[in-house]
Amino acid sequence: MATPAPDPATEADLKQLRQTMEQEMKDQPENVHYNMGSAYLLARKSSEAAGEFKLALAINAKDMASLTGLGRAYAQQNLFTEAIAEYQKAININPNDATARLALG
């Protein structure tokens, strides 16, 4: 499971985080993309977040954190059909996933 990303407050924070994460890319690329996606979500940059979660899922299509993160990114963009589809994918992989179930209501 990926570790949570810090809460960036500024563009400079995002830039520094990106540089740090790129250093870690060699060892755990899906975690780097997940963490960047989470940071973008916190910064309300949902389009960028979605891109990062998609990159993580290209490496590991069953990464629950990235699936639910992509769902959150879509929901922030009011793309509710897409968000529901991502949460449903997560539930199909793990029917007991609380995050996805809670998001679906």
Image (cartoon, rainbow, N blue to C red):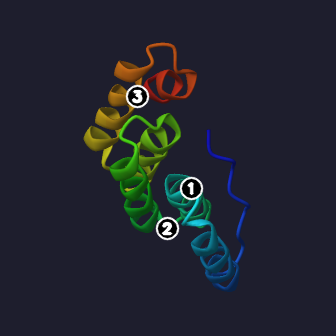
Dot 1: what SS? loop
Q: Quadrant of residue 67?
A: top left
Residue that protrudes farthest toward the front in the picture: 27
Task: Point out the image quarter for the N terminus.
Answer: top right
The disc, 3 or 2, on the residue closer to the chain's N-terminal end is 2
Cα–Cα gap, marks 1 and 2: 23 Å
Label 3 and label 2: CA atoms lie apart by: 22 Å
Q: Of discs 1 and 2, which sits in the foreground?
A: 1
At x 63% / y 74%, what residue is drawn?
A: 23
Mark 1: few/some/many CA within 10 Å (<14, 14-19, 20+):
few
Could you tell me if the residues under marks 3 and 2 are in contact, i.e. CB atoms within 8 Å?
no
Q: Which residue is mark 3?
A: 90
**Residue that numbered label 1 is attached to:** 28
Judging by the rendered image, the residue that carries numbered circle 2 is: 45
Q: What distance separates the C-alpha of mark 3 from that of mark 1?
A: 21 Å
Q: Quadrant of residue 42?
A: bottom right
Taking the spot 69% from the left edge, 47% from the top edge, the residue there is 3
Q: Amino acid at mark 1?
A: Gln
